[in-house]
Image (cartoon, rainbow, N blue to C red):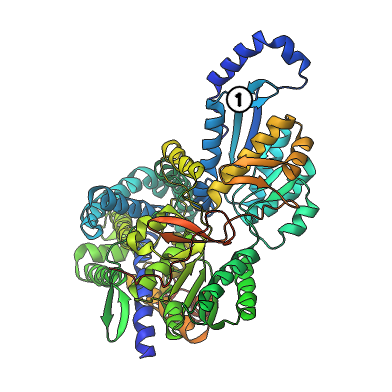
């Protein structure tokens, strides 16, 4: 399970450097010869699907790139990263145990977070107690502001579910004001914390914006036939269809809508819409589908990231949390390079500093990254961010969505 | 109209449940192996179909021609190499069941591990026959309809084999009483191995067919095993028609509840039905009163 990364060459290089600069390094207190970074990630169990597209490849890519450059630049030395990796088996107890082991036995300098809201909330208290910075990137909960106060070491990077719903409704309201869509909405949501938080916020926002919720149901996770729900949703002839779903459901809902020729003017699906799998599975039929997340595909830095990800990981990243995860690691790297491996100082720097990342300049407010894409849309084979509309590179929504082809 | 819609959609969903459970009922009912790696075999078949379709443009229905014999042979080998020693050692059926649970639990991790090494943890899926077809005014997906058709053909065909052929009779004899079967010169081990291999082939057929419309990854086998176990126990262990009936019933209830009551209650309704059946008939719909 334990793996020491192939940083030997980099370490030798750094060693050669140290010998010449040893006098200087000695004065430069507390510069280690390597930085040990540990994480426990879901390599088996139900969270594997999400972790292996959004989180694990990003960790591996980042470590590879940093070590290829010689390591983290602390003081005027390059210090390579050594990785300790565990499998949390998609289980919160295992995740907590692994983090205790990383801290007490492996004595790692930094710990990277697990994937999913649930696991991040589970390991929050222990990371806080141990004083490790907690980059809770894949955590999407309305309690984030409150948690950021309770755990000053933690930071939340995906915005709030209520932001996603509010931004989505804002896009739809603009479209309605332009006369492009009517007021009827059908909404389904998976009945767990994710689906409930998003649908509750959306219900509220739809009400305020004067939309009519003609169909509003939740379904248990693992439902294998989406047609019954879609048929009832279709019967209300909605202008807008919203599905706060997980990846397998998102694909099943889209597939069923295609089979039923269910063509609302706006078709919005949840997690998984931003996955390359969505494009691969639906091809041209992805065009016009809206979903959570998005990115500015015209940005040169993201274009470069896409190429690096393809080369380093062997496949494309998702267009929501994956680039944000990479940005969080860049922020961590810059914080370490500014203040060294002192964890308390890194925590402080992460909370107050400004960082230059692939998603642009990042500055946390109250432990939260607020400037993130909420709604994206597949346009010409790319998942562009369309809301918040004030964000750099925001595209106009294409409405109505083209009818499903064969 | 709504009734036809519910019946048809329910049968199609139920057909899928039955399809993914029939192999387990053979393995558990006849060979007495509670195969916890069942779902992993199904996922392996789904991956094979995926690779054949995306890599070599072999459509899944043709892929079956390759996957079925392969799965039969592989499961035969698993039975001979891994499970026969357990069968020899076991003094009672209960002991064999316990041992086989432990052994196949290990097999589960081996197969899953191989899956993770080759395919990683991410989701896979492809589009095949994902087109609408209208039956009695109800729109259904062709790929799901094909899966239902296969479930029906396989169930009826196997039922015929079991009740009308000599080997089939031997298989049933072993299912009912392995000790007595030995007395009438039935090679129990070969028959049980045959049933296990046939169960594995059925399971793989299920995997290939559901891969046409479900999204899967290497971690998902457990979910299939769980669902199959419910269907098998509800239908009566070892009874193919029982598995078919239980699967269809679960599909019908799920669809009816989703349309008429609330989609949020489908899972609850499924388990309520499961409990209800077991309360009235503790050995399942078609189960024998005592074994």
Give the total number of marks visible in the rendering.
1
Query: Where is the N terminus of chain B found, in terms of image quarters?
Result: bottom left
The answer to which image quadrant residue A84 occupies is top right
Seen at 34% across and 76% down, the residue is: A261
Q: Residue at x 35, y 46 (%)?
A: B78
Residue B137 at x, y percent in the picture: 29, 86
Q: Residue at x 64, y 33 (%)?
A: A37
Q: Is residue A379 left or right of residue B165?
A: right
Q: Is residue B101 above or below residue B286?
A: above
Image coords of residue A96 (percent x, y): 69, 46
Q: Position of residue B65 (x, y in %)?
A: 20, 55
Q: Report in which chain the residue with disc 1 lies.
A: A
Q: Secondary structure at mark 1?
A: loop
Query: Image height check: is B23 above or below A404?
Result: above
Above or below, B142 against B276 in this view is above
Up/down of A83 relative to A98, above or below: above
Residue at the disc numbered 1: A80
**Dot 1: few (<14), some (14–19), or many (≥20) neighbours within 10 Å?**
many
The part of the image, by quadrant, that contains residue A146 is: bottom right
Q: Is residue B185 left or right of residue A114?
A: left
Q: Is residue B227 left or right of residue B191?
A: right
Name the residue located 70 percent from the left edge and 36 percent from the top edge.
A335
- Viewer-proximal residue, A150 or A375? A375
Foreground residue, B161 or B112? B112
Q: Does the image show residue A273?
A: yes
């Amino acid at each position: 399970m334990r793996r020491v990364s192939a940083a030997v060459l980099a370490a030798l290089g750094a060693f050669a450097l140290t010998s010449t600069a040893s006098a200087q390094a000695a004065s430069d207190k507390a510069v280690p010869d390597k930085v040990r970074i540990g994480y426990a990630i879901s390599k088996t169990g139900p969270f594997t699907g999400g972790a292996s597209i959004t989180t694990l490849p990003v960790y591996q890519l980042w470590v590879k790139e940093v070590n290829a450059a010689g390591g983290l630049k602390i003081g005027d030395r390059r210090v390579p990263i050594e990785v300790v990796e565990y499998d949390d088996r998609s289980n919160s107890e295992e995740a907590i145990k692994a983090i205790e082991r990383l801290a007490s036995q492996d004595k790692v300098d930094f710990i990277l977070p697990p994937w999913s809201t649930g696991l991040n909330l589970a390991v929050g208290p222990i990371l806080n107690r141990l004083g490790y910075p907690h980059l809770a990137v894949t955590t999407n909960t309305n309690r984030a502001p409150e948690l950021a106060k309770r755990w000053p070491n933690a930071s939340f990077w995906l915005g709030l579910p209520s932001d996603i719903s509010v931004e989505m409704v804002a896009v739809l309201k603009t479209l309605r004001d332009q006369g492009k869509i009517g007021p009827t909405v059908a909404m389904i949501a998976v009945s767990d914390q994710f689906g409930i938080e998003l649908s509750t916020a959306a219900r509220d926002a739809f009400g305020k914006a004067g939309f009519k919720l003609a169909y509003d149901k939740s379904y248990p996770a693992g439902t294998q036939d989406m047609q019954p729900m879609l048929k009832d949703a279709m019967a209300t002839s909605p202008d807008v269809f919203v599905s706060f779903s997980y990846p397998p459901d998102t694909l099943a809902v889209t597939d069923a809508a295609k089979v039923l020729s269910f063509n609302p003017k706006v078709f919005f699906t949840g997690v998984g819409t931003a996955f390359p799998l969505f494009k691969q599975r639906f091809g041209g039929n992805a065009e016009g589908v809206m979903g959570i997340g998005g990115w500015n595909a015209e940005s040169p830095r993201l274009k470069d990231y896409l190429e690096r990800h393809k080369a380093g990981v062997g496949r494309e990243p998702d267009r929501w949390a994956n680039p944000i995860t990479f940005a969080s690691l860049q922020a961590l790297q810059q914080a370490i390079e500014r203040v060294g491996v002192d964890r308390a100082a890194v925590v402080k720097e992460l909370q107050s500093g400004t960082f230059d990342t692939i998603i642009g300049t990042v500055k946390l407010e109250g432990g939260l990254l607020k400037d993130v894409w909420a709604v994206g849309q597949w346009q010409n084979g790319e998942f562009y961010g369309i809301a918040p509309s004030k964000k750099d590179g925001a595209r106009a929504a294409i409405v109505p969505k083209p009818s499903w082809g064969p | 109209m709504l009734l036809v819609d519910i019946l048809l959609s329910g049968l199609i969903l139920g057909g899928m449940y039955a399809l993914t459970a029939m192999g387990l009922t053979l393995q558990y009912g006849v060979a007495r192996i509670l195969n916890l790696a069942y779902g992993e075999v199904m996922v392996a078949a789904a991956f094979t179909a995926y690779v054949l379709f995306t890599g070599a443009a072999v459509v899944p229905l043709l892929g079956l021609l390759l996957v079925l014999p392969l799965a039969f042979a592989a499961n035969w080998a698993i039975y001979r190499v891994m499970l026969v020693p357990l069968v020899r050692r076991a003094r009672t059926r209960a002991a064999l069941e316990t041992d086989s649970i432990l052994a196949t639990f290990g097999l589960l991790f081996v197969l899953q591990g191989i899956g993770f090494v080759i395919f990683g943890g991410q989701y896979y899926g492809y589009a095949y026959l994902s087109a609408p077809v209208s039956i009695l005014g109800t729109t259904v997906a062709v790929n799901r309809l094909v899966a239902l058709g296969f479930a029906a053909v396989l169930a009826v065909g196997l039922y015929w084999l079991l009740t009308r052929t000599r080997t089939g009779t031997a298989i049933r004899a072993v299912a009912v009483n392995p000790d007595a079967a030995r007395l009438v010169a039935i090679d129990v081990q070969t028959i049980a191995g045959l049933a296990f291999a046939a169960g594995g082939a059925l399971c793989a057929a299920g995997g290939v067919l559901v891969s046409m419309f479900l999204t899967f990854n290497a971690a998902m086998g457990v979910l299939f095993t769980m669902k199959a176990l419910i269907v098998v126990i509800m239908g009566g262990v070892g009874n193919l028609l029982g598995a078919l009936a239980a699967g269809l019933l679960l599909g019908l209830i799920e669809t009816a509840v989703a349309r008429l009551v609330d989609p949020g209650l489908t899972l609850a309704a499924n388990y309520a039905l499961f409990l209800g059946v077991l309360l009235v008939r503790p050995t399942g719909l078609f189960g024998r009163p005592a074994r």
